[in-house]
Amino acid sequence: MGITIHYRAVIRCDGSYIDELFDRLENILRSDAILNIKRIDGFEKEYDFEKAKTAINELPLPSSLDGNPFIYTHYPVSKEQLCPEHRKVLVANIHPGCETFKLEFIKQKEQDVWIMPYSFVKTQFAPVWVHIFICSLLCQVESMVRAKGGSFNLNDEGDYYYSKDPKKLYESMRYVDSLIGRIIGALSDSKL
């Protein structure tokens, strides 16, 4: 539970364009003194390959309760299984109160199509600036993906990405904090 940013993309390009995107993001991260950054080029283990195969063959669709997305259910993309050929990953630990920020692009076999499978980062327990900073990174991703005619999808539970309104984000975070507080209070009262 907590404010989360969900994202995915598809782009037709060669691997050097993904490297260029990662270079741009890494420069932004380093300029903000975020140095805990890791890049992965390829599959480190067989498990990574199998995980990538599953990721590019599933499409997450939000389910909702009272009109608000609360869970993503994964459905097959097509009857024909896509096969991954290569993988490029950028991982950054931006703040201790935030989950690790991860961008992973997986190249389809024998095509110049790179899929960034459904990913997410929870920012609820970090300062508001962290959520805003991650949104700015994802704006760079969206810009470069769309510049090549690609598809980029994002759902920001904090309602900041598209509104650029920090007050909405702050209100969303406070609301979720109050829900978490009520749950903790109810659990404490029930003496579980």
Image (cartoon, rainbow, N blue to C red):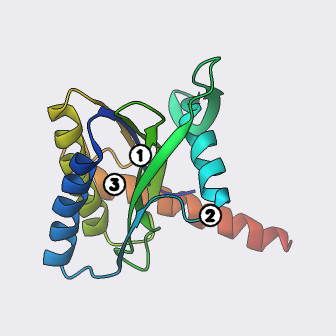
> The residue under label 1 is which amino acid type?
Glu
What residue appears at the point 26 percent right and 36 percent down from the top-left corner?
13
- Distance (Cα) linking label 2 and label 3: 42 Å
- Distance (Cα) linking label 2 and label 1: 33 Å
User: The N terminus is located in which quarter?
Assistant: bottom right
Q: Secondary structure at mark 1?
A: loop
> The residue under label 3 is which amino acid type?
Glu
- Residue 161 visible to an observer of this rendering: yes
Q: Is 142 placed left or right of 57 in the picture?
A: left
Q: Is residue 119 above or below residue 112?
A: below
Q: Nearer the viewer, residue 9 or 157?
A: 9
Q: Which residue is mark 2?
A: 45
* Circle nearer the N terminus (1, 3): 1
What residue appears at the point 62 percent right and 63 percent down from the top-left corner?
45
- Residues packed near mark 2 inside 10 Å, few (<14), some (14 to 19) or many (20 plus): few
Residue 28 pos. (x, y %)? 16, 67
Q: Secondary structure at mark 2?
A: loop
Quadrant for residue 36, please give it: bottom left
Q: Which residue is mark 1?
A: 157
The answer to whether marks 2 and 1 mark residues whose Cβ atoms lie closer than 8 Å is: no
Q: Nearer the viewer, residue 63 or 144?
A: 144
Disc 2 or disc 3, which is closer to the eye?
Answer: 2
Q: Is residue 20 above or below residue 118?
A: below
> The residue under label 2 is which amino acid type?
Lys
- Distance (Cα) linking label 1 and label 3: 11 Å
* Circle nearer the N terminus (2, 3): 2
Q: Which residue is mark 3?
A: 171
* Circle nearer the N terminus (2, 1): 2
Q: Secondary structure at mark 3?
A: helix
Residue 46 pos. (x, y %)? 66, 58
What residue appears at the point 59 percent right and 19 percent down from the top-left corner?
78
